[in-house]
Structures are given as C-alpha cells and as structure tokens.
Amino acid sequence: MNDEPEPAGFPNTDTDEADTQRILLNVIHPDRVKLEFETRDKYPNRDGFIEIANEDEIPIGDLVIQVKKLNQEYTDPPKFPAKVKTLIYARAISPPLLILGVDVDEGKVYWKHISRKWLQEQEDDLREQKTKTIHFSEDHVLDGENRGYISEWENIAVENKEKIKNLDEYKRLKKTATPALGKESPYYPHIHRFLDEYNRLRSVEFEVIQRWEADDVWSYGYVDGIFEDDQVLFGLYPIPSTVNDVQIKEIDRSELVEMDSHRVVRVIHQAGNPLKSSPEEYAKSQIKDRVEDIIENQNLDLSNSNFLVREVVFDFVDEHHEIMGLEKQDEYETDELYDGFFYYLQNWLDTAISSFAEADFRDFVSYGEYLSPVAVTGRLREEKMEEIHEQIDGTEGELQYLYPIGTHRYSPQVLAEAFDKVSSIDDSIERPYLEPDEVPDEQDSWYVWEGYSQNRLLKNVERVWSNLPTSYNSIVRSNFPEVQDDLIYFDKYSKIVIQVNNSDSDQRPSETRLFLSKKGDNSKVSVEVVPADEAPDVIDNATPGDHIEVFDEEYTVETLSVGEPVFFADKPPVLSESCSRLEDQIDDYFSDVSSHFGRLIPNAAAQSDIGEDEDQDS
C-alpha cells in the first residue's frame, strides 16, 4: 500500500479561507507588495509570503504571513486569539512574521509584526498560556486606499536583512576590495559570461541553491585573485538585494584567502583556466557541484511528502527521544512531537549547556552551523542527565526555539520543517517501518537483518519501494520545478519487481531489482515485492532489452540490478535512495559539462605563490 498522499490544494469548500484571501487581494497594492499563498497543509504556522518591492518593483525583502478571519466578537476592537505555537514560530524563521486579521464584513485587514522584542515582552504569558490575544492597532490597517503600511513593511524587511549572515565580513569585503570600475581588461568578458550563466542557473533552473544560501542573496560577484593561462584564483561573494554593488572586485590575494576562511567568499583555485576557455560551461560545473552538495546533504524541501516527514521525524526521535521528554513508541500524538522538538528539547539542551562551567553554546556547535544534541549528551553522565530531566519536569514550553538543532544527517532547516509539518498530517503519526521482532538472544553482536522475521522484512521492503516513486517525484516537484521534466526517473517505468533473496535464511538478504516498461502504458508505476521462492523464474535470467512475461503481463526489461536491500542501506531509506537516484539524474542533466577542467587546488592558502609574488600580473 502506498502511504504517500498527493499534495493537497486549498479546499473549495473552505469559504473562510476563500473570503480572507479575496479581501486581502483587494486591499494589497500589487505594485509594491507581491502576495503568494502556499498550499494550505504545507505548514501549520504560515499561510504564505509577501515580497516587498521598491518603487522600481525590484524585490528588497520577504515577510511570512499567517492569515486569520476575525469573527464578529473580535472586530470591535480588532483582536485575535493566536496559538502560542504560531507566535513562537517567529523565532525559528529568518523572515519576519506578520499576523493578518481579516474583517470580512468591513473589507479591512489588520496587521501585527511578531517581532523578537515583542516576544521577549510577552515572555511570561507565552510560558503559561496556550493562546495569546493579539490586539491590532487601528493605525495598522489595510483598506485598499491607505499606502502607509508599505513603508512600514519595507522597514521591517530591510531591518531584518541587515542581520544577514556574515554581514560584518561582507562590509569588510566592500571596504577592502577595490571595485574594478572604469578599468579595461581582455579577461573581463570571460568573467561576465561566467557570472551571467552562474547567476541565471541559480535563480531559475536551480533556485534550490538560494534556499540554502545566506539570506536574501540577489546575485554573486567575482573577486579577482589570479587570472592566467595556467591557473585561476577567484572568489564568489554574495550581493544582497538591498545593496547596489559592482560584480567584479580586486583584492590582495592573502586577503582573499583569509575571507575564504571566514566563509565570506567561496574561493576556487584551479590549475588551468576554464574561465578563459569555456566560461559558461565552467559556470554549469560550479552549479552542478552546489546542487550535488545539497542533494548529498539531503538539504531538500520535504514538506510535500508526508512519508518523508515521517521518516525524518522517527529517525530523529528514535535517537533523541529521551531528551525530548518522550518514550520510544510506534505511534505519537503529533502535538507531543511538536512540543518535544520545539520546547522540551530546547529547554533540556539549554539547561544542560548552562550546567557546564563557563560553557557557551558555540562550544557545542558543529561546522559553525548547528547544535548537535550528541555534542551535549556525549559530555554528560547518566545521573547528570536525570538531574536535568528533574530540573525541567513540568516546565515544557518555558523556552522556545533558541538553538538551531541539527545532526550529521539533517540540517536545522530540514528538522524544523519536518517537526513543524507533523501537526498538519494528522492527530497522530505511525512509525513508517516495522521494528525488529526476532532479536537474537544471548548474543553480544548480530547483523541487523537477523532481527527481522521474513514477514516483517518483506513488509518493510514493500513500504520502501511502494513509497519511493511518489517520494522521489515530490522532492523533484518541490525543489526543481523548472527542470522536473528532465529529472524524471520512476515515471519511465510501468512496473518495478523487487525479488528479495535469502529472506527466510540466516544469510545476508539481497534484492534483485527489475525495472520494466510496457509500450503505450502511461499509468503510474506499480511495484511488486516477492520472496525469491515465489518470484517468476524468468527474473533470474533476465537481461536488459529482453521481452518477458511476469504476472501475466508482457514487459520490456529496461534495467536490472542486484544489491543490499534499500531498507538496510543508508538511513532513512526512502529519502537516501531518492537522493541517490536524483544525483544520477543531475549527472545526466549536466552530461554536456566536462568532468575535468584541470586540477582543482584544494587549499589555496597552502600555495606558496599566493600573497608572495605581488609583482605577478593577475
């Protein structure tokens, strides 16, 4: 059975939502405010985005919106009882959060900025209450004529963008680097061609890159270090949309390398000079590398796939349930998962970090990006962990999203989105896979497959493969909408047959995977999982190109492979396998890009000629 539902749109019967959207669209000024509603069930704490543009209609910043219809009892004066969870969501996201209260009868929209300062002022109420009444100001109203709100929203967006990552270092770059204004060089056209293609690809075909970059990056500029026939050294630096900046700068080479160590610029030092010989192709190769990094790290939007959300949530909870205030179970109420991640875990980690003498949050941060729970628990004895539980017993929710929680498998954004999504799936969610049922007794060590009966192993393999095609498609649609037709994989097949070998023995099990097509068949791919002793004999002797009959149907064998069951491969299995297949498709998409542009020099700072031979032309 396929557990993967199709993403839902806004229900036609949801008249309240239709009314609020209609009123909001009537009073918004589209020349300066671009409104985008999201799929209704994608996130429980937000309904969409507002993009603020300047007078030339150039985007300058985003705002997240939560839209609520004001019932009659809340219109005089205008107010709204908001869930505390929704308000706390403002701490977990980088764009500012606006609560929009819509008075349908009067055709007006009131707004409230949920700022961090406001949240601090309401700290006591937010600790003790499930809801908090938002009182709207009569000065903060949209009626279709008043345009004063635009400048206020613009100020909120711009002020937020002033806090982007590496802002101080970016300012240092602006101060230190020399803009190449008015200069002429025979290699500038090559750099322009490279930048044009690089910025086009990251903003159109592969917009997914922007999701994982510093906030509000409009484009990338070029910092020149070396430009010669036999090598090139340069940096790519982010230009925020609020900044009018030149795209080519010059800088001392040693300064450039230092800024790379501060992660202000991404320095590339290449033997040979592909920027000179093939700038557009080299831009594609750089984009390909960025996309492959994103896929390899599973930094993808998974929120339109309930099954993938379940995979991620249970994988995390199985490892960290204790410090989330949960017992390991096969089913959880979604509210307890949400509270366990956003409240109890945050509270627990904050208390633990505070217990170390002169400890600082940054002491436990991995790769400068996220707080790993293991980095904290690994330094605590069991009795100390119990003491922390006792300290925070009954105080869940006192602290909110203070720390960006991540692991070696999941970035903070992926985890936050997954746990934010669970509340909209259902009141409870079940474990995606069956647990071991035949754990060997009196053995110090045993192989993972020894813990599963044949029945449970086959059911888990079936759950993987029945959800894999729809999960893969969901990832492609959500992350690569502009090139999704080029990245199709499972839709090329009519049937997938998975023969599970050694499923009823003590030997290591394996899978024989047969991908079949049928001429003129445009239906969705179907999946059959069978043990070896029940599989059609023809499978063992099939080769690509054969025309075979399986399950009373005629098919052509497209591909065939044998390997370890995906269920026992990387965790979580469907997400990991989807990423693996997606990497193959990305390789095909960039098949025209040369795989070798000359030797990439991995450590520019270690090269003796950098910063020493200042007389060398660049």
Image (cartoon, grey):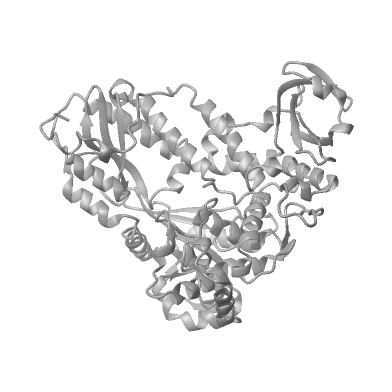
In this orientation, which residue lies closer to the viewer: 303 or 612?
612
The answer to whether 299 is drawn above or below residue 372 in the figure is above
| Nearer to me, 211 or 567 | 567
Q: Position of residue 502 (x, y in %)?
A: 81, 36
* Picture layout, residue 123 above or below residue 566: below
Residue placed most toward the observer, 476 or 499:
499
* Image position of 426 (left or right of 61): right
Left or right: 276, with 129 as reference point: left
Give the residue drawn at x 71%, y 43%: 567
Residue 286: image location, x then y, percent: 39, 33
User: In which quadrant is the N terminus drawn?
Assistant: top right
Q: Can you say which quadrant of the picture contains the C terminus? A: top left
Query: Quick check: can you spot residue 28?
Result: no
- Residue 181 as seen in the image, left or right of residue 122: left
Q: Position of residue 443 (x, y in %)?
A: 75, 54
* Residue sticking out furthest to the left: 615
Give the image quarter of residue 63: bottom left
Camera-side residue of 137 and 301: 301
Residue 304 coordinates in the image, percent (x, y): 62, 49
Numbered-mark total: 0
Inspect this view and state whether residue 308 appears: yes
- Residue 428 position by quadrant: bottom right
